[in-house]
Image (cartoon, rainbow, N blue to C red):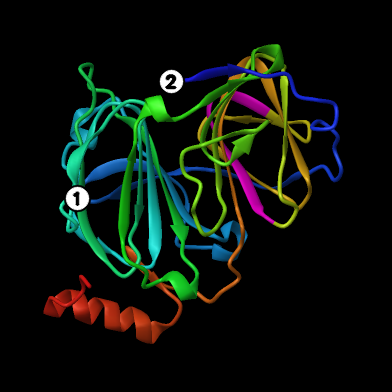
């Protein structure tokens, strides 16, 4: 992994319109796939609050029986799925012919577009640990039926920027102080950062004023608007140009995610997300009659 030490300039740290917490949510346990125990951070409700994102699942587990049955072959259309692995291995295969394994620190970025069928089978590491997250991002109407594409991003391709006060940021998508992540041609212009912040240090990050932005705490705690937000908790922020993330007394690690809202109608059933019910019905008919893959 490349490591870059940068001191932000005073111009970069100027705050124009500070964002504050809009909604604070705790993730909830659910069972998905063939019997995978995970925590759903958000999904299948309040779509406008998270636009352009649809779902975030936390599949951190120390119990192999809770994840080994995995997610056998299933379709997607109209969305992108982003899987980030912290510990363990996930075997995958899809209708494009891609096969392989994403391991600790790797990312799988899959654009379903007009349709893809794939499977994801978590294997865990040598100690039986399987830690990771899956994010679903919506595609705009004009791109719903784009050709599907698939990208494995190895941890060595993800830059890590080191800032003052011991703060480090892994950049999956987006830019921090002039350093950009490997995913740069995504339609919703997302930022996806893995932020590690030492005890009581503050990371200030500029954001497009009209973009949806949230954090998900995965270690320690973050202080937001004088409230302490701990592991497995999501914070959605109001509009603004800048966000301050201050770690609690034990330090913190969080995922920071932002993107440009689509502001389009959503017709959603399981792994397929379209704009109208007619499009949704057509997708499922095509899946049943074997014409789903274009």
Q: Which element is circle 2 on?
A: loop
Question: In the image, residue 221 lies at what x, y percent?
Answer: 61, 25
Question: Is residue 130 depicted above or below 250 in this figure?
Answer: below
Chain part drawn in magenta: 211-222
How many marks the image carries: the answer is 2
Q: Find out whether the residues at labels 2 and 1 contact each other: C-beta distance under 8 Å.
A: no
Residue at image location 86% in from the left, 34% down from the top: 14
Spatial separation of the CA atoms under disc 2 and disc 1? 28 Å
**Who comes first in sequence, dot 2 or dot 1?**
2
Judging by the rendered image, the residue that carries numbered circle 2 is: 1
Q: Which quadrant of the rendered structure holds the C terminus?
A: bottom left
Report which quarter residue 207 is drawn in.
Answer: top right
Question: In the image, residue 264 lies at what x, y percent?
Answer: 56, 74
Residue at image location 55% in from the left, 58% down from the top: 188
Closer-to-camera residue (229/1) = 1
Question: Crowding near pointer 1: few (<14 within 10 Å), some, many (20+)?
Answer: some
Question: In the image, residue 244 lies at what x, y percent?
Answer: 75, 33
Q: Which quadrant of the rendered structure holds the N terminus?
A: top left
Q: Is residue 214 magenta?
A: yes
Q: Residue furthest left?
A: 290
Residue at image location 47% in from the left, 75% down from the top: 142
Judging by the rendered image, the residue that carries numbered circle 1 is: 119
Question: Is residue 1 depicted above or below 183 in this figure?
Answer: above
Q: Is 171 situated left or right of 286 in this image?
A: right
Question: Crowding near pointer 2: few (<14 within 10 Å), some, many (20+)?
Answer: few
């Amino acid at each position: 992994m490349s490591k870059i030490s940068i001191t932000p300039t005073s111009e970069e740290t100027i705050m124009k319109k500070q964002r504050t917490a809009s909604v604070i949510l705790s993730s909830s346990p659910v069972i998905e796939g063939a019997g995978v125990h995970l925590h759903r951070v958000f999904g299948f409700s309040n779509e406008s609050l998270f636009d352009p994102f649809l779902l975030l699942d936390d599949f951190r587990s120390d119990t192999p029986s809770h994840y080994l049955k995995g997610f056998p072959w299933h379709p997607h259309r109209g969305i992108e799925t982003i899987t980030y692995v912290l510990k363990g291995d996930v075997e995958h295969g899809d209708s494009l012919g891609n096969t392989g394994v994403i391991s600790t620190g790797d990312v799988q970025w899959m654009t379903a577009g007009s349709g893809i069928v794939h499977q994801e089978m978590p294997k865990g590491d040598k100690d039986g640990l399987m830690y990771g997250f899956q994010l679903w991002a919506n595609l705009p109407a004009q791109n719903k039926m784009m050709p599907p594409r698939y990208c494995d991003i190895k941890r060595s391709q993800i830059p890590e920027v080191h800032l003052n006060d011991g703060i480090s940021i892994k950049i999956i998508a987006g830019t921090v102080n002039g350093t950009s992540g490997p995913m740069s041609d995504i339609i919703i212009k997302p930022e996806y950062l893995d932020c590690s912040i030492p005890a009581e240090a503050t990371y200030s990050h500029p954001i497009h004023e009209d973009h949806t932005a949230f954090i998900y705490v995965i270690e320690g705690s973050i202080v937001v608007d004088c409230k302490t937000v701990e592991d497995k908790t999501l914070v959605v922020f109001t509009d603004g140009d800048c966000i301050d993330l201050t770690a609690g007394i034990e330090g913190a690690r969080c995922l920071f995610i932002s993107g440009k809202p689509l502001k389009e109608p959503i017709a959603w059933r399981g792994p397929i997300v379209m704009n109208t019910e007619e499009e949704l019905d057509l997708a499922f008919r095509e899946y049943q009659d074997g014409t789903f893959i274009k």
